[in-house]
Image (spheres, rainbow, N blue to C red):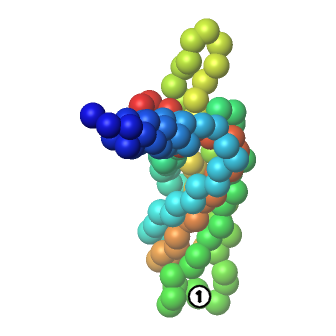
Amino acid sequence: MGQLETFRRQMNSERVRHDDIMTTRAQETVVNGRFVINNTGEARKSIVFPVAFSKLPVITFGVEIAPGFISTRAPVITAEVYDWQFTERLPISRLYTGAKVLVVSEGATVSKFTITWSASGIAYSNPRS
């Protein structure tokens, strides 16, 4: 094995190490998702983040009303987190991996809308590897 082969192995090893660090480091992250709600009333939905947040993320919600489902009055729709999904990291920290969402809507009984959500905060992109 020559010096060129040794150099290639060292470079490949360094690249793999760099890739591993980049996939597990904590950084400011924004993730988005959406789910559909049919009809008015109350609905509960669990969302799973594709990352693990090191602290409670900030979550915002938006609403898209499906075409043809607006009557004479626009519906009133709210969404909120009522519980967090997390993994304990001993001795005293948590990784936030999801949220349980409550959606309450009032308006025409036949409604269809999409809730969009966005969660932001410091997150690990691959904490389990």
Q: Position of residue 31 (x, y in %)?
A: 58, 55
How many numbered marks, from 0 up?
A: 1
Q: Position of residue 39 (x, y in %)?
A: 47, 69
Residue that appears at 66% across and 60% down: 61
Q: With 109 as the anchor, is 2 left or right in this view?
A: left
Q: With 112 as the anchor, is 71 left or right in this view?
A: right
Residue 116 vs residue 92, the one in the foreground: 92
Q: Position of residue 97 (x, y in %)?
A: 53, 37
Residue furthest to the top in view is: 91
Q: With 78 as the anchor, is 3 left or right in this view?
A: left
Task: Tell me the crowding category of disc 1: few under 14, some 14 to 19, or many 20 or more residues within 10 angstroms, Cα based.
Answer: few
Residue furthest to the front in view is: 2
Kindly identify which residue carries mark 1.
71
**Residue 79 shows in the view:** no
Q: Quadrant of the N terminus?
A: top left
Residue that appears at 54% across and 36% down: 21
Task: Give the image quarter of residue 129.
Answer: top left
Residue that appears at 69% across and 33% down: 55
Q: Position of residue 58 (x, y in %)?
A: 72, 47
Q: Secondary structure at mark 1?
A: loop
Is residue 65 shown above or below 95?
below
Residue 109 vs residue 80, the one in the foreground: 80
Residue 14 vs residue 42, the one in the foreground: 14
Q: Which kind of residue does numbered mark 1 sit on?
A: Ser
Residue 31 vs residue 48, the one in the foreground: 31
Is residue 38 shown above or below 83?
below
Residue that appears at 65% across and 50% down: 29
**Residue 35 shows in the view:** yes
Is residue 124 shown above or below 30?
above
